Image (tube, grey):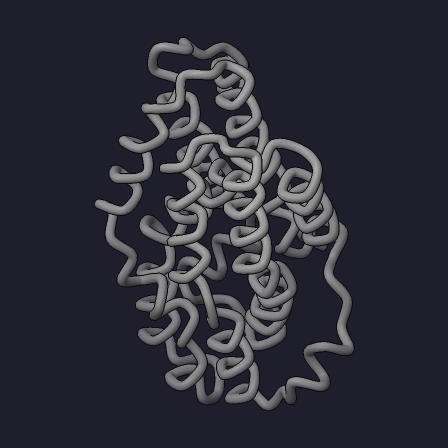
Amino acid sequence: MQTQTQSWNPMDWTSALEDEARLLVEELGMHPGAQRLFNGSVGKEGYLSWLVQTYHYVQWTTPLLEQAGLRMKRLGRHVMLAELLLQKAAEERGHERWLLADLKNLGWTRKQVESTHPCRAVEAYIAWNRFQSEAGSPTAFLGTAFVLEYLSVHRAGEAMKRLLERNAIPNIRKAVTFLRGHAGADGGHVAELVAVLRTLTEPAEQAAILLSARNTRALYTGLFPEPE
């Protein structure tokens, strides 16, 4: 399946982008740690670990989107896409506070959360997207944003529902703020993003977006511990 994602038609390159997002959902469906989150059987420690690692990358989302959008404006390139990046920065603002609220309701203080370290996958995710926003192709962050938004549409609501149904984690009903916030993600937003991206005709920019989407797919499973 991965071989198919290496070749893409520049006339409809967004199909390859959607393939990356679909592949991530499929890969997570086969990953034991992700399966437990999605079916609600994850234990408290596993859920805490996922929330903490998600916090470590989500706190960078708004700053990086803003930086990428403003840099594109300074460069005078793709004004519509620059505005889209800034719009998404505003939409994502404060989502790290949802994670802190969930962690607080599971007994963790902000100080405890901030004393932890991002895992290797999150470190790589942050480093890659910082490079693209600051010195590479700022448009590339849209590939990352697309894959994560697609994942939210297809899995956040399911994970929240299953966690609440099982009710196995103490105080879980007050600790799904982040998932609930993304459970309402509208699939129309994904379609809207694809429609805007189809206006991008430069092969180098298309390739940069696809590469960021592919890197995000490769790294995201690293948020979950390897099975023992």
* Residue at the farthest left position: 188
Asked if 58 appears above or below 88 in the picture, the reply is: below
Asked if 29 appears above or below 101 in the picture, the reply is: above
For residue 185, say whether it is visible.
yes
Q: Is residue 43 left or right of residue 114?
A: left
Observer-nearest residue: 164 or 3?
3
Observer-nearest residue: 137 or 54?
137
Q: Quadrant of residue 44?
A: bottom right
Q: Residue at x 43, y 36 (%)?
A: 21
Where does the image place residue 35, in percent across and percent down from the top left?
48, 53
Where does the image place residue 39, in percent across and percent down from the top left?
40, 60
Q: Quadrant of residue 211?
A: top right
Where does the image place residue 117, in percent across and percent down from the top left?
77, 66
Q: Residue at x 43, y 70 (%)?
A: 178
Quadrant containing the C terminus is: bottom right
Observer-nearest residue: 149 or 199?
199
Asked if 79 appears above or below 148 in the picture, the reply is: above
Q: Residue at x 32, y 38 (%)?
A: 193
Q: Quadrant of residue 199?
A: top left
